[in-house]
Image (tube, rainbow, N blue to C red):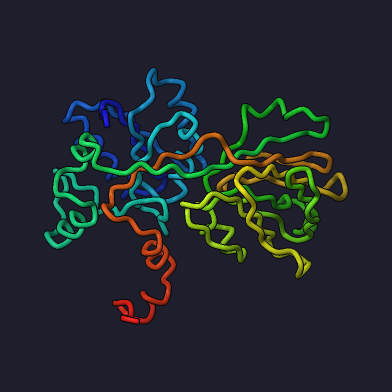
Amino acid sequence: MRLERVWLIARAGSQAAQRQARRCAADLRDQGVHVVTAISGLARDPYPGLLASEAHLPDLALVLGGDGTVLGAARHLAPLDVPLLSFNVGGHLGFLTHDRRLLRLASESPPAEQAEAATAEAGGSSGLWQRLRDDRFALEQRMMLEARIDRGDGVEDPGVAGPHLALNDFYFRPGLDELSSTCVLELEIDGEVVDQYRGDGLIVATPTGSTGYAMAAGGPILHPGLEGIVVNPICPMSLSSRAVVVPPRAQLSVWPLGESSRRLRLWQDGVQATTLEPGDRALVQRSQHGALLITLEQSPSYYRTLTHKLHWAGSLIAAEPSHN
């Protein structure tokens, strides 16, 4: 990998992430790398400013934070084919991030046992930046979704500059100012009406997002190596309304039904995207762009990640799995 320009994105509100960002920036600049740093969070979106002010795209986006920070970077940088390398610094579950111990910098000397563990997991003893220059990593492409809004006249919303993108999910929920927290949504797949959901909303998720809100709402977990779209109702009032997985080529249309005063909000990866009213339609499908995620582990295991992050039986019952 050419490592001449790096955008370093740190999670807003995390002193640990911002301290680590300063260390990484100093280390990279000492090696002659052009580094641009920025803070990212729910109330701080650095990407429009970066894309407007920087003459060149980065060779790498280094993301320090949790999954939310990675999701924000993916939405803006995936269409530009910028690879993301992320570390869980100041985040929570961190399904999309590496352990922060893999940040092996000269300016930070971890205890010997942590250094050995990080070295073994990363599959080598050379510095992180040299590993990237030597192409000693894997590049994984994760499926994303896009949503376009039809305001009822067959013409896309002129106020939306391109489609909304999501690496995890889109979900439809009633507006917070509504008297009732429920809504009625009609789902059409490939031109065929499938169901009308009455409940708290609807989630449309990627395999990556299947371990997020969709899982919390009772949906299935999909391995990210699969390609499919999870459609999962949120607290439906009918026992027959169930989560389904449809092919990645499926074209989904979601219509809010009911009185004109009942607004519906579309969220992308936990961030509000836009508002729909009865008569509007959201068109959701697979995006032509995928998120490029750098993997440093020599032998990555999705199942090990699930066991660790979700505290499954092996980590709850004993420190070591059974021999059965």
Residue 297 % position (x, y): 28, 52
- For residue 126, side relative to residue 264 (left or right): left
* Closest to the observer, 85 or 249: 249
Answer above or below: position of 262 versus 93: above
**Side of 187 relative to 81 (left or right):** right
Q: Is residue 238 above or below residue 209?
A: below
Q: How many marks?
A: 0
Question: Of all residues shown, which one is farthest toward the top?
Answer: 55
| Location of residue 243 in the rendering, given as x and y in whole percent from the top left corner | 66, 61
The quarter of the displayed image where residue 54 is located: top left
Q: Is residue 44 above or below residue 200?
A: above
The percent position of residue 108, horizontal first and vertical second, equals 16, 48
**Quadrant location of the N terminus in the rendered image:** top left
Residue 186 relative to residue 103: left or right: right
Seen from the viewer's position, the closer of residues 110 and 142 is 142
Which one is in front, 138 or 15? 138
In the image, farthest residue toward the left:
112
Q: Residue furthest right?
A: 259
Q: Is residue 52 left or right of residue 86?
A: right
Identify which residue is drawn at 57% across, 37% down. Answer: 287
- Picture quadrant of residue 241: bottom right
Q: Quadrant of residue 62?
A: top left
Q: Residue at x 24, y 48 (%)?
A: 103
Which residue appears at 82% of the width and 34% of the height? Answer: 152
| Quadrant placement of the C terminus | bottom left
Residue drawn at point x = 75 percent, y = 41 percent? 276
User: Where in the figure is residue 122, as x and y percent of width and height?
Assistant: 23, 52
